[in-house]
Amino acid sequence: MIEVKNLRKQFGPKLAVDGISFTVAKGEVLGFLGPNGAGKSTTMRMLTGFLTPTDGSVKIGTHDMALAPVAAKSLIGYLPENAPSYPDMTVSGFLRFAAEIRGLSGSERDIAVDRSMDYCFLKPVRHQTIDTLSKGFRHRTCFAQALLHDPEVLVLDEPTDGLDPNQKYEARNLIKRLGETKAVIFSTHILEEVDAACSRVIIIDRGRIVANDTPANLKKKTPNGKLEDLFRQMTVSDTGTKHS
Amino acid sequence: MNRNVANTMIIAKRELAGYFTSPVAYVFLIIFLLLTGLFTFMIGRMFERNEASLDAFFMWHPWLYLFLVPSVGMRLWSEERRQGTLELLMTLPITQWQAIVGKFIASWAFLALALVLTCPLVFTVEYLGSPDYGAVVSGYIGSLMLAGAYLAITCFTSSLTRNQVISFVLSVTICLIMILAGWPPVTDFVRGVAPSLVEFVTAFSVMTHFEGFQKGVIDSRDFLFFASVITFSLFGTSLMLRSLRA
């Protein structure tokens, strides 16, 4: 469903993403791991058509993002980093707006909004304006927006960021469940999440893929079977020190 | 309905509703009506003119709009950038133009509403005598075009920055330059320095092009002037947004 070929992104002199290629099939949950500044968000922004790649291509389903952006985008549900939404709108108003943009109207729209609110436990705050909500609710409102049209592809940039442990647990279960029928890619720097939800892991460092395997296989590569050690071995922190 | 139109309207609907969920809309409408009243009657001396026309009303519009229109439009793109919702908007299955036009239309419709609310003035001149309704209608059309031109400029400046204040100041400055290019003290100065340039400079002024509308003349060139300022500014907005995503 997602096919990324040799993706590169240059910001001025800085090469943020340096030739990344991977595919995600339906029924797969791909965990996107990497230290801060490794190029995770930039990759996801190119994947969803927000940023134009310097080089390389993105294909969603049968649609090329550069050639048919609207068709490609209609297959994606996207939760951007920091979960932006319109603070002066109510939760249900915001979701109705997003559903309409997705081409849903009338009762179809209301059913979709209702279902998304159920998924994300938003029913109690549906009539509240978003700026009165706690961070967790705001985050889930944006998450709900990504699920409205029952997309075939889900791109989630740090979906569990800012959630409390209970909410994190719920979110992981939701991702796992959604991954049974969709192609899901989500970024995180919480390693236990990879174990809990992913069928495959990509570790990126300084814009390049340094590992692409199942969590079980990756664990075998370390002497004590801990993903954390592998992560530290393979990546450089933004303070510039290589861990050993 | 055509998907293009439908998407533009969905964007416009959300944007327009946004004005009314905050006090912004009400504060703006009240201030707008107070100021037009003040300028028309106190400074324009509409009653002392002894004529049933809205000249005393329309003549202030280029100056009134100078501050009021940027205050309506300054948040259009700045706020999307600051809140990060730009990313959301640009990854929804719509084109960039649908978003730009939708947001522009919403704000323009809001300004049109403010203008409609000045209709008691029309009743006043009707009561005073028999006004030239051609001039009244063309005055309103001209005023709406003028507001649209200022608004499009503000739309562009708001795409340049995530800061609403900067967006406001920039658009006031650009609009002011477009007023001054046709303001007698400035045109007299230009005439003194380089007489051949006078026509060139005044051609860029909103004053020159708004004048005809006030007199009841809808000249296609004046209409075209405002329409091209709008098109040009929205095109600039599109380029700016594209460069943000490059």
Image (cartoon, coloured by chain):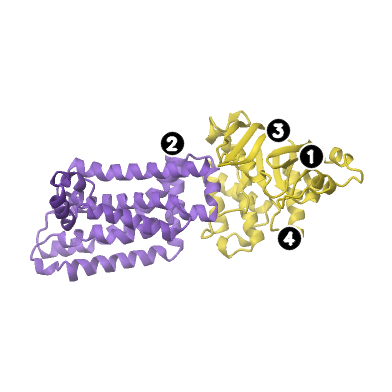
Q: Are marks 4 and 3 on the same chain?
A: yes
- For the residue labelled by badge 2, is the local secondary structure a helix, a strand or a loop? loop
Which residue lies under the disc numbered 3? Answer: A22
Q: Distance from label 2 to label 4 (Cα)?
A: 44 Å
Image-based side of B160 in relation to A157, left or right: left
Q: Earlier in the sequence, mark 1 or mark 3?
A: 3
Residue reaching furthest to the bottom: B42
Q: Distance from label 2 to label 1 (Cα)?
A: 41 Å
Query: Mark 2 — on which chain does it sit?
Result: B
Please state which amino acid type lies under the numbered disc 1: Ser
Residues A178 and B186: in front is: B186
Q: Earlier in the sequence, mark 4 or mark 3?
A: 3
Q: Please name the residue shown 47% across and 44% down the image.
A: B241
Q: Are marks 1 and 3 on the same chain?
A: yes
Image-based side of B52 in relation to B57, left or right: left
**Residue A28 position (above or below residue B17):** above
Which residue lies under the disc numbered 1? Answer: A199
Which residue lies under the disc numbered 2? Answer: B2
- For the residue labelled by badge 1, is the local secondary structure a helix, a strand or a loop? loop
Tell me the tag on residue A164. 4
Mark 1 crowdedness (10 Å alpha carbons): few <14, some 14-19, many ≥20: some
Q: Please name the residue shown 15% across and 50% down the image.
A: B193
